[in-house]
Amino acid sequence: MTKPDGPPELNEIRADLNRLVIDAFNADSRKIPDDIPILDLGVSSLDLVEGMRRVFDYFGVLVSIRRVIEGQLTLGGLALYIEQELLTQKSAKKGAQSATQVWIIQREVPLDITQQHIAFLSRYSNEAAAAYNEALVVHLEGDLHGPAIQAALEEAGNRYEALRTALDAESDVLTVGAGQSLELLVSLASREQLAARLAEVVSRPFEPGKRLFRAELLRLSENKHILVLVGHALVLDQDSLRLVLAEIARLYQVFSQDESASPASAPMPPCVQWADYLALGSTAEAHTLQSQAQAYWKRVFADGVPRLELPSDFPRPPIKKYAGARLALALDTSVQRSLQHWAATQNLGVWRILFAACAAFVHRIAGSEDMVMGVESEAVYLETGLPVFAHTHSMLPVRVNFDPACSFREYAHAQEQRLAEANAHTVFSFTDLIRTLQAPRDQSRSALFTTAFRASTQPPAPDFAGVKATFLLPPSARARYDLEFIALTNEQGFQLVCEYSSELFEEASIARWMQGIQVLLSTALQDSARPCGSLPMLVAADQELVLRQWNDTDRPFPREQTVLDLILEQASLHPDKNALRFGEHYLTYAQMRRRMESIAEALQAAGAGKDQHVGVLLRRSLDLVPAMLSIWRLGAAIVPLDSSFPEQRMAYMLADAVVQIVLTNRELLPLLAGNNTVHTLCIEEIGPQCAPLGADTAPATGSDTAQILFTSGSTGKPKGVEVRHSALLNVLLEMRALLEVGRDSRMLALTTTSFDISTIELYMPLLAGGLVEVGEDGLVADGLHLAERIHAHRPSHIQATPSSLKNLLAAGWNGDSSLCLLSAGEALGRELAEVLLEKCGQLWNLYGPTETTVFSVACRVTHAPGKPVRIGRPLANTRLYVLDARMQPVPIGAVGELYIGGEGVSPGYWNRPELTAERFLSDPFQPGERIYRTGDLARYLPDGELVCLGRIDDQVKVHGVRVELGEVEMALRSLSGVRDAVVTPWKDANGDIQLVAHIIPAEPDGPATAAIRAHLRQRLPEVMVPPHIMFCTAFPLTANGKI
């Protein structure tokens, strides 16, 4: 069709309009009725936009889509409107200030379904509002004409509604204003100030009721400037900001040549305005799409919303503040080439592959096989084919499943399918979905997902009439999510950008993870058939750290000797020095040695000898240590027993360890009365002189078994752990050095001998010529008497479990600045640690399973409120690995299972070869060596120290959501009226898991259960709030002092 030369008559307009829209709407008839609303003709959103574009191209009249929809325009009404506009244009004065002033009207537009959620969050706080700022930063180099760029900005503001729109302070209404022209703010900025100034401009929240767009020009020098465009996500996104920039550049070319030039010389190109785009959401077609989308998302989350827990550097604050930062990684050239080639061969988009790589990495560092990632959608309503000056995308809660055995090729195609499904259902209300799913409300994190991904293609910066323009990556001081990956494509190639919460992560951790994604991606592209779970995630330098440098602990020690050998050396050096104390009674080193010999002689006479297993069931006294040493003197192994053990358990242990002799007290004989297979020897009956030891008596050597310690077994029967002499000596010598134990050291021994940590108390001081004070039975559980004993006897070192240390504090212990406290056997919480640090001179956190000989890791605790207590670094001759399910090292900062190798690794479980084979494995990094699988979750910190995160099985699933019991316990303990808390799972009659909180109140009456739940609901999702709360005065402790 040929455009009319002048203003046509109304009938001509109707005829031309009829032909235009028949073609655009794909109508079958030759004529469309003039009196039927256009929307009632079954016109799709895309056809409607195309029709209005053709109207603009043919008549030069811009018709608002919102006018068509809200005004229920008929074809006749549209023809009349076009006629009026053409007449107005004819009578307009030539050279008017703006070629678009006819469209500048003030109106109110209700938020669409995708904007309501953003508006809610923006009102939540200034920090949240700033997190939804979108920004473009452009470096301009050349002779920039100030008035011209100001004029270009003003004219762009006149033309595009998004640039003069404000959010009503109270209602969900956006107001398109016709007020003051856009003003370009200009300020000076030095190179030193630039980063801070950019961050301030980009992250400054928009004031309520004011326009949601601003432009600022930072002048660096006469010919260098930084142009910053900032728009709120309610009205603009990165794509539309780039359109705004292009329009400013196009107008700048006109005004820079002639300041008095008419904007009509750069006519406004056809586009879709912000309000018109939103109007598409009110069509019948959009309502149908919304219903379909809501139904789809309900199906996706029919079994609940999985919760992702990323390993963080800092504890999650109870209320999210949106503080964030941004880091960019340019992919290696070789990776970019492989990425493009593989994308072509697989018929996959590059950014879809990058999404798959990021998702697989997140799965593995979080140890999750089911998660939700937010993914930026394609255009919510339609792809118009025209520039759209609006925010056209929403975040889709894409549910991603992970099978470690699945190949990367299969995984990438599966994600392609999942993303296609999600993008077919973009028109939905985020708020309604949250309400429908009854998703837990949690002020500490974003709803439905905490990790997101989006793709962004950045074309070259537009030409500013000879001024060179270059895009810069905007700084970010805010983050919407815990992690948001951005696959950025620009002139330089492919970049991976990560916006992250600085409340949770340090920059070093994010940098390592991004490098890890590149390593995973690079390997996957070269071998896409490889299972996702076996793809490497560490750069070579980090792998060297975690496998070699941080495990460089080889130190010489007398491997062929035993603890007894070195204690006897001290006895020879200091025979008259006190070695043992019990109450007010002492034994010197010489007396201890003689008593040991007497007991050994009696045991030998009873039949004990080399490689036999001797049971020890003794009251605590001065005889305890000599009795233990006497068994080693014969080359036999100790099997420690405890009088608190049930008779059946003790009988099993004696039979399993093939114990033939038990050294005991007369008063404890009834505990062994039912066991006819062992010979008992009462220590009270052993005098100072017995028959001398036989000439062929062979004491223990380093390779012999020192003791068999029984620990709880998953089968219900205890399992015996063999401990070698060399392993025991290694850990005791290392602890002696770390704790600076010497001749003047005095250690109060509190722990039952059946608990492996007792060896530290009973023998370590004796290796240095120090004193061991044997505490009486029950002292460790009696906080009041223990506090009195510490005050009276002033020991230099005490070891206890955190539970016992809490009892000590509860008894009113005032502390001792010269005391070195050792916390072991249980996880040491930060709150308890901070209190203890004020009460003692040194506090150590010690970790190690019995299977790796007492302790494998140690850390001197320092003040660090809010941070988890570390377990530290490996001890001498110890190797630590944090591995995934396929026994590969996880990235630094990621969670994995802790494996321990080195001198301390036990030969295995006594008489349990199958269980030994399951837990004691070949070391994949040290051929010929063995490692122990602890079952504990841990992660490396960037400085090489470890944090232990609890047992792998210390998780329960409540209503489909995985719950860490420790997290609930920590929240309970943060309540002022709660002294301590333990949370346990309970299965009700329906088989559903429910949480039970056991609370020791700080005061007798305690806080009300309603107050406790209200406190928890401020910090935890509803699913983590225990429905059952029980109060108690104390937690029952095992003989080892554990709950």
Image (tube, grey):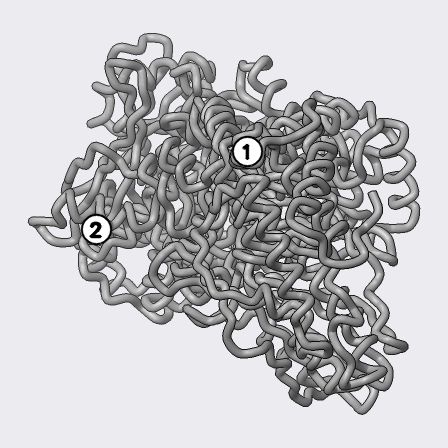
Q: Of the residues tagged 2 and 1, which is closer to the observer?
A: 1
Q: Earlier in the sequence, mark 2 or mark 1?
A: 1
Q: Quadrant of residue 354?
A: top right
Residue at label 2? Answer: 978
Q: List x then y, in percent, for residue 326.
A: 65, 61
Q: Is residue 467 above or below residue 962?
A: below
- Residue 868 seen: no
Q: Residues within 10 Å of mark 2 (few under 14, many from 20)?
A: some
Rendered-image quadrant of the N terminus: top right
Q: How far apart in space, not on screen, are marks 2 and 1 (Cα)?
A: 34 Å
Residue at label 1? Answer: 371
Rendered-image quadrant of the C terminus: top left
Q: List x then y, in percent, for residue 428.
A: 49, 36
Q: Dot 2 lies on which element? A: strand
Q: Going by the image, does 138 lie left or right of 1017?
A: right
Q: Going by the image, does 440 lie left or right of 265?
A: left
Tell me the residue at 83%/66% (across/down).
462
Q: Dot 1 lies on which element? A: strand
User: What's the residue type where badge 1 is placed?
Assistant: Met
User: Which residue sits furthest left?
Assistant: 1005
Q: List x then y, in percent, for residue 327.
A: 69, 60
User: What's the residue type where badge 2 is placed?
Assistant: Val
Q: Residues within 10 Å of mark 1 (few under 14, many from 20)?
A: many
The label shown at residue 54 is none
